[in-house]
Amino acid sequence: MMRFLALAALCALSACGRGGPMYASASPVSPAAGAGAAAGAAIATGVPSLMPEQLVIEGTLTVRVDEIGDVVPALRALVEGAGGRIINEVVTGAERSWMAQLKVRVPPSRVEEVAGFLAKRGQIDEKRITSSDVSKQLFDQEIALKNLHTTMERLNALMAQGGLKVAEILQIEQEMTRLRGQIEAIEGEQRFLKDRVAYATLDIGLTRRAGAVVVAQAKLYPGVRFASLVLLDPRGRARIRSGAGVVVHSLLRSHSIEVDVFQKKPDAAGEETSNAMLLTTGGAAYSDFLGSGRRRTLNPYVGGRIGYGYLDAHNLVLQGEVGVELFKARNIIVDANARMTALLGKDSDLGVVLGGGATFAF
């Protein structure tokens, strides 16, 4: 029973009771008495009465620059070279970057160096640097830790004496567990504060002076082609007519308009005729089993076309198409194709149009 009363008195004296405050509160005193009390506390605890100033520095900078893609890597190199680190980096738009948000940790002595670097690379629209002294918090934490460790030592000594009842042992262990939790919590807060003191935190916002980078997007794909019209049944006329034409793809293979003009050839009576012409619209599709049109070379496709044609007379034109893209890049496509062609009208004809050409992004 006496040991139990000693334990209760010990906890009460250390101001660490389960419902009591973590730090002992002081009664109002005069300045002189306060100075004396501080000196007395310093002697009792072993903590210096005048603790060095401990500043937490935080800042915000908003900067307009010419090219974010140039500034961000240079800023990263500067921060890392200064012994700091970037803990968060968000760049909007990737290669089209026009805005970036960075959270930077640097030693306090290098804050002005970072601000000076940004001032040279762009225009600072906003600069706000604040500092707060946390030396009192750290001082109070040191006192609280010393008191808690002292209480733990006394409880350990009490346990080492032996001869305690089971109920007393359980109560002491419960109290020690609670004290360990308080010690760990204060030590965690202390590490966090010391880290904030050791490294200033800067929130840096970068925007591109000219706004977002506008990346060219093709509206049309105009091109040229060379073609030959081969009649399956010439009926006394020239079997092959060479020609050339123009093509406009609106969405690559999905739709296009083409005009092919073929050279003059004598008709069956030997008389000179006008140029043959085909004006068609249609499209084609890639095969999912043959690359889906994603390869840079040899992309096969099939399609169909309809339109107007003139070959000795006015005709309705129907075409079935097979082709292959010989080369494909972002801004150019080179292809070759063969089209079974029916010219339907007063004098119908059946032939094949062999062609090839190139289209370019516009």
Image (cartoon, grey):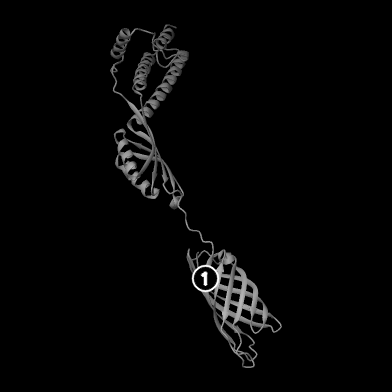
Q: Is residue 83 visible?
A: no
Q: Is residue 319 above or below residue 291?
A: below
Tell me if mark 1 has few (under 14), some (14-19) or many (20+) residues whose alpha carbon lies within 10 angstroms of its own.
Answer: many
Q: Quadrant of residue 31?
A: top left
Residue identified by numbered label 1: 223
The residue closer to the viewer here, 174 or 210, is 210
**Residue at 54% across, 64% down:** 220
Q: Please, what is the three-letter code of the amino acid marked with disc 1? A: Gly
Of helix, strand and loop, which one carries label 1?
strand
Quarter holding the N terminus is: top left
Q: Nearer the viewer, residue 16 or 98?
A: 98
- Taking depth in this image into account, of 228 and 346 the one nearest to the observer is 346
Residue 308, position as x, y percentages in the image: 65, 75
Q: Quadrant of residue 189?
A: top left
Residue 118's place in the image compared with 10, above or below, is: below
Q: List the single residue furthest toward the right.
A: 346
In the rendered image, residue 57, in percent from the top left (x then y), is placed at 35, 30
Name the quadrant containing residue 341: bottom right
Q: Is 321 on the left-hand or right-hand side of 14?
A: right
Give above or below for 205 relative to 175.
below
Q: Say if residue 170 shows up in the picture.
A: yes
Q: Position of residue 30 (x, y in %)?
A: 34, 7
Residue in view at x 35 percent, y 22 percent: 138
x, y percent for residue 58: 37, 32
Residue drawn 32% across the image and 7% down it: 33
**Left or right: 132 in relation to 341:** left
Q: Is residue 88 above or below residue 334?
A: above
- Left or right of 234 in this view: 6: left
